[in-house]
Image (cartoon, coloured by chain):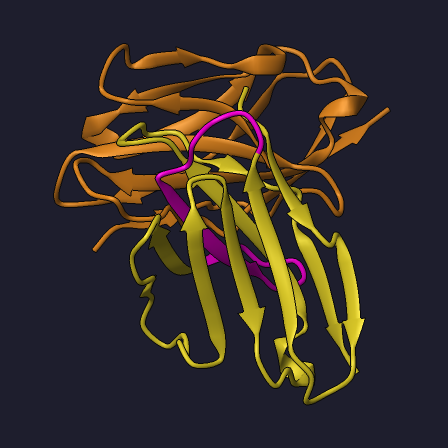
Amino acid sequence: GAVVSQHPSRVICKSGTSVKIECRSLDFQATTMFWYRQFPKQSLMLMATSNEGSKATYEQGVEKDKFLINHASLTLSTLTVTSAHPEDSSFYICSARFGQEETQYFGPGTRLLVL
Amino acid sequence: AQSVTQLDSQVPVFEEAPVELRCNYSSSVSVYLFWYVQYPNQGLQLLLKYTSAATLVKGINGFEAEFKKSETSFHLTKPSAHMSDAAEYFCAVRTGGGADGLTFGKGTHLIIQP
């Protein structure tokens, strides 16, 4: 199956700093990438959808100025958590899809801990 | 709006016993349905998907699921559980034709007892 990577796998930062998470599709061109957030022992919640070369579409309740998403190429999307606070600590997972294919391929996730 | 309900937060089964993880969905339009598995501290791996072809879908690791429109269900089954099946399982739905992300259920933790 298709491979999606995320970097870093784990990050610890101080409150008030910004953190960038990368999501790459390694062996296919991802026309659409998705960012999810997962709290401990809970399900994944969709944060935003991004299409290459256009602005991301955010889900209701997700602050677009806090969670900056850039999908500059067909193989790379980045999520930047700006001015991170402890409540932003979570597991962030990206997924990628080619064209209108139904299947999303998920990255391994990035665990963010804000102190 | 679409939603997914996984009725059981955890399901314990004995090794080699059959497994059934329940999933019900609600949607006013046609749907694509998915089952994903998540091992601790890892991302999600696709087990199988329903895309309006055959209603009985076979996936990896011996799992299968049957789409029942009249019951709005897509339960995941396996005839014989292995210790390596212990994980979190998520059912997800996506409506057809759009570019939307997936809506996930809350997950079911499958516990394998020796």
Kindly identify the residue that appears in the image at 32 percent across and 52 percent down.
Answer: A53
Q: Quadrant of the N terminus of chain B?
A: bottom left
In the image, A61: left or right of A76? left
Q: Position of residue B108 (x, y in %)?
A: 58, 43
Q: Tell me the magenta residue range.
A: A26-46
Residue B76 horizontal/vertical position (percent): 48, 25
Chain coloured yellow: which letter? A
Q: Position of residue B3 (x, y in %)?
A: 31, 51
Shade of chain B as shown in the rendered figure:
orange
Q: Relative to residue A40, is residue A1 depicted above or below?
A: above
The outermost residue toward the right is B114
Whether residue A110 appears in magenta in the rendering, the answer is no
In this view, the residue in front, B28 or A114, is: A114
Where is residue B113, by image quadrant?
top right
Please report the residue visible at 55 percent of the width from the left and 46 percent of the height from the top: B107
Q: Is residue A110 visible?
A: yes
Locate residue B32, reporting x and y percent: 28, 31
Instruction: Relative to A40, say whether B76 is above or below.
Output: above
Residue drawn at point x = 53 percent, y = 33 percent: B36
